[in-house]
Image (spheres, grey):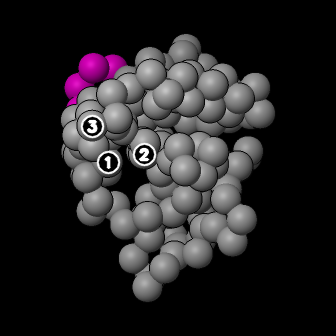
Amino acid sequence: MSPRYFIFAQQYCQAFNSHLIRIDNQIEFHFIQGVLNELYQTAPKDGIHTVSSYWTAANDIMKEGYWVWSPMNVPMRYTIWMESEPNNYKGQENCAEINYVRQFKMNDVDCELKISFICEIYRKMDR
């Protein structure tokens, strides 16, 4: 998807009965890491079409340091943060991205960045 602010990416997914990607366990992490790595490796490297960052559903918007999966605010039980993350740099990082440069490990960033995103279809247990 074309880059959007976190809230608009989340709303886009919800309009299609889905949510931003969640990483609930190591198996999911390795699957997502493999798929996105393959996409990155095969993408044109012209500086325009190369996408390396994607929003996740993770955020601590409601309470600093208490990370949940939106939109249902389910507490995160499995995390795969980069070293020294989340760090809430300058007190403005309340949403989480995954990034090729960081081996698709999570990094907290400003929710007002425009980042690409992937919608995940709800499973019955998510509802």
Q: The magenta stretch spans which residues? A: 12-17
Residue where numbered disc 3 is placed = 46
Pointers 1 and 2 in contact (C-beta within 8 Å): yes
**Residue 53: x %, y % from top left:** 42, 45
Residue 108 appears in the picture as rendered: yes
> In the image as oriented, which residue stretches furthest toward the bottom?
90
**Residue 82: x %, y % from top left:** 67, 59
Q: CA distance from mark 1 to mark 2?
A: 6 Å
Horizontal side, residue 28 vs residue 8: left or right: right
Q: Which residue type does callout 2 highlight?
A: Ser
Which is closer to the viewer, label 3 or label 2? 3
Q: Nearer the viewer, residue 79 or 71?
A: 79
Lower position in the chain sequence, tag 1 or tag 2: 2
Q: CA distance from mark 3 to mark 2?
A: 16 Å
Residue sitting at 49 percent across and 79 percent down?
89
Residue sitting at 43 percent across and 42 percent down?
52
Horizontal side, residue 89 vs residue 80: left or right: left
Q: Which residue type does callout 3 highlight?
A: Asp
Residue sitting at 55 percent across and 36 percent down?
22
Q: Nearer the viewer, residue 46 or 59?
A: 46
Q: Which residue type does callout 1 highlight?
A: Ile
Q: Quadrant of the N terminus?
A: top left
- Element type at mark 3: loop
Residue where numbered disc 2 is placed = 53
> In the image as oriented, which residue stretches furthest toward the front?
46
Determine which quarter of the picture holds residue 95: bottom left
- Element type at mark 2: strand
Residue where numbered disc 1 is placed = 115
